[in-house]
Image (cartoon, rainbow, N blue to C red):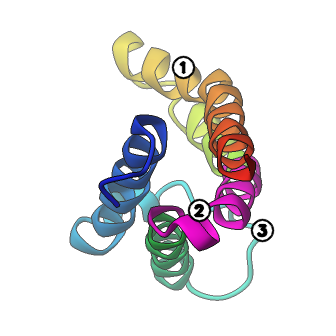
Amino acid sequence: MAAAPRSARLLVGLLAGAGVAHFVAPEPFDAIVPRSLPGKTRTWTHLSGAAELALAAGIAVPRTRRVSALAAAGFFAAVFPANVRMAYDWRHRPAPLRAAACARLPLQVPLVLWARNVADDARG
């Protein structure tokens, strides 16, 4: 992936790191899985981590970078409900933790836009 633009390499690192974290330390991720999803929480945590690892791998390969980056943009939008749940669940925690949980909400927008930009860069 040496020829990949810096933005794509950074996105790969973010997704790969998050994906690994879902397996190494799954508890924080379990805590934000929406209750409305069927099945076991840990299964959703592992599926989410596997998806992030697959997206990272796809973005790392020039041939699949565009479609994988578009899928990453969709993924970032799809996990927004987990961030909403975290903000709601943490509403009674100390102020710094509440602030961190609430700060995640608008951060999804730049993540989606970042992935879209990587996809656009891969097009041409």
Which residue is farthest left? Answer: 24
Left of 56 or right of it: where is 116? right
Name the magenta segment's main secondary structure: helix
The front one of 54 and 99 is: 54
Residue 89 position, x and y percent, is 57, 39
Near mark 1 (Cα within 10 A), the count class, few <14, some 14-19 or many ≥20, is few
Residue 74 position, x and y percent, is 77, 55
Q: Are marks 1 and 3 in contact (CB under 8 Å)?
A: no
Q: Is residue 35 magenta?
A: no
> On screen, 37 above or below 76?
below
Residue 32 position, x and y percent, is 54, 54
> On screen, 23 above or below 71?
below
Q: Which image quadrant for residue 70?
A: bottom right
Q: Earlier in the sequence, mark 2 or mark 1?
A: 2
Range covered by the magenta-colored residues: 59-78
Which residue is farthest top? Answer: 95
SS label for mark 3: loop
Left of 9 or right of it: where is 2? left
Q: Which mark is residue 36?
A: 3
> On screen, 62 above or below 3?
below
Image point (30%, 55%), residue name: 2
Image point (44%, 64%), residue name: 60
Q: What residue is pinned by disc 2?
A: 33
Q: Which image quadrant for residue 110?
A: top right
Q: Earlier in the sequence, mark 1 or mark 3?
A: 3
Q: What residue is pinned by disc 1?
A: 103
SS label for mark 2: loop
Q: Which mark is residue 82?
A: none
Query: Spatial distance from mark 2 to mark 1, Cα to Cα?
Result: 18 Å
